[in-house]
Structures are given as structure tokens and as C-alpha cells.
Amino acid sequence: MSDRDDLFDDANGHLALGELAEAASLYRRCLEVDPDFFDGWHALGMALLKLGEVKEAIGCGLKAVTLRPNDLLAWTALSQMYVRDGNIAEAEAAKGNARILSLGGKVDRTAS
């Protein structure tokens, strides 16, 4: 197992125990090892959202959908982040992308 995976597993353990700050710290370390690790960005975004760090969570969510533009869960999470931020237009756009994916379509990130 790689350092990245060890850190990710440790972070998930803290998350399961409700230790959100510790989990976020480990997810950040995981991303230092591998900046293109989709699961790390997604998990960090969700942990930050639960911690109330909404703006930073949105940044993580945007990185996740950039890495995997056709990931339904990533778009759904990003929509939730925008809702928490009060940005309803962006939340609806992200939700729309999730809906396209749920129906078997693809998201064209080159058009944006």
C-alpha cells in the first residue's frame, strides 16, 4: 500500500469516529503526496463541509469534478456545497450535471 493510501485509510478512520479536523488534516497530507487523487479531494471537500469550511469545500469539490467530470457523486456533493454557501444558481447547475449523469449522459467540461 502507498503512503497516499495509508494516509487516506487513516483519514477515513478519523472520519468514521467523527474526528473531522483530524480527517481533514490527513486528507490534505494525502493530497500533498498525490495532487490528482480524486478520492482525496472528494473526501476533503465533504469533511470541510461538515466542519463549516464551505468556501474551501467548494474549491475541493471543483477540483474533484475537474478530475472526474462524469462522477455523479462529485456533482451531487458540489451542489450541496453551493447550497450551503447560498449560491443557488451554481447549486442548480451542479445538480443539473448530476441529473444528466444519473440518466446515463455525459458532462462536457470543455464547453465551460
Image (spheres, helix red, strand yellow):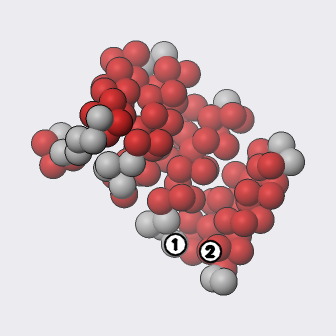
Q: Is 14 displayed left or right of 56 in the figure?
A: right
Identify whether 92 is placed above or below 2: above
Please provide percent x and percent y for residue 89. 33, 18
What is the distance, in whole Å, between disc 2 and disc 1 at their CAs? 7 Å
- Looking at the picture, which amino acid does disc 1 mark? Asp
Nearer the observer, 104 or 55: 104
The quadrant in which residue 98 appears is top left
Task: Give coordinates of residue 109: x percent, y percent.
Answer: 21, 46
Q: Which residue shows up at 64% across the image and 73% down it?
A: 5
- Residue 2: where, in percent of width, then height? 63, 82
Q: Which residue is mark 1?
A: 34
Three-letter code, disc 2: Arg
User: Label 1's element?
Assistant: loop
Residue placed under numbered mark 2 in the picture: 4
Q: Secondary structure at mark 2?
A: helix
Residue 82 in percent (x, y) is at 46, 26
Name above or below for residue 61 compared with residue 86.
Answer: below
Mark closer to the chain start, 2 or 1: 2
> Which residue sits furthest front?
103
> Which circle marks residue 83 in the picture?
none
In the image, 104 versus 25, the foreground residue is 104
Q: Quadrant of the C terminus?
A: top left
- Residue at (73, 57) in percent of width and height: 12
Q: Which residue reaches farthest bottom?
A: 1
